[in-house]
Image (cartoon, rainbow, N blue to C red):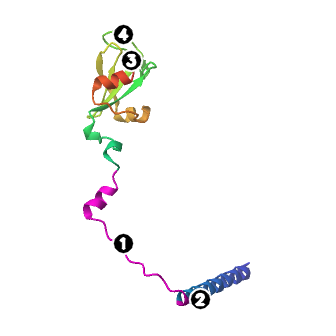
Amino acid sequence: MFFRRAREDRAFREAQRAGHELLLQLQATQPWRDLTEPAAPAAEESAMSDLPPPELRVPSRPEVAGLMMRWEQPLVIDGEVRTCPECGVYRDWIVFCMRDDSVWLRCRAGHQVQEPQLDAAWYNRNSGPVDHWHPTLEEGLRHLGH
């Protein structure tokens, strides 16, 4: 087996040398076009060319007051079904993740309560991708059906 591999390696090296010699002959006989370097773009052009146009950019996290998602099923935390302390409903929540990583629950009646047992990590695990950006809370709630 060792000798076969040595023969294959030798054959490969010979093929490489033959290809290199052919390339040198081709370069000697073919006149190469004079390729000039393209002009370098202006510094501000090159910095901006990597960014998408403004209408395609999404707001950064500091520019967003919070994220929201709809949670239609009962919300179970540590084995307990979470209910609204004011009206007693236990499903169809809007879950908010605020800029300070606190999580708030809002029932359909508009009662809001902070949920200290949930955090931004829980929200990120359970939320889907962001599909819309809304300038006001009311527009976001309307989009989610509340």
Is 4 situated left or right of 44 in this image? right
Q: What SS does tag 2 mark? A: helix
Is 134 situated left or right of 91 in this image? left
Which quarter of the rendering shows the N terminus?
bottom right
- How many neighbours does mark 2 have within 10 angstroms: few (below 14), some (14-19), or many (20 or more)? few
Q: x%, y% of residue 25?
A: 57, 89
Q: Which residue is mark 3?
A: 82
**Of the residues shown, which amino acid type is indicated by label 1?**
Pro
Q: Which residue is mark 4?
A: 88
Q: Main secondary structure of the magenta part?
A: loop
Q: Residue furthest top?
A: 87
Is 29 situated left or right of 84 in this image? right
**Disc 3 + disc 4, Cβ < 8 Å:** no
Q: Earlier in the sequence, mark 4 or mark 2?
A: 2
Could you tell me how far apart the alpha carbons at marks 1 and 2 are, in whole angstroms? 31 Å
Q: Is residue 132 above or below residue 113?
A: below
Q: Nearer the viewer, mark 4 or mark 1?
A: 1
- Magenta-drawn segment: 28-51
Q: x%, y% of residue 12?
A: 65, 81
Which quarter of the rendering shows the C terminus?
top left
Identify the residue at horizontal 38%, vertical 12% (top origin): 89
For residue 21, the mark is 2
**Of the residues shown, which amino acid type is indicated by label 4?**
Gly
Q: Earlier in the sequence, mark 3 or mark 1?
A: 1
Could you tell me how far apart the alpha carbons at marks 3 and 1 are, in whole angstroms? 64 Å
Q: Which residue is mark 1?
A: 38
**Of the residues shown, which amino acid type is indicated by label 3?**
Arg
Q: x%, y% of residue 83?
A: 37, 14
Q: Earlier in the sequence, mark 4 or mark 1?
A: 1
Identify the residue at horizontal 71%, vertical 83% (top origin): 7
Q: Is residue 86 above or below residue 67?
A: above
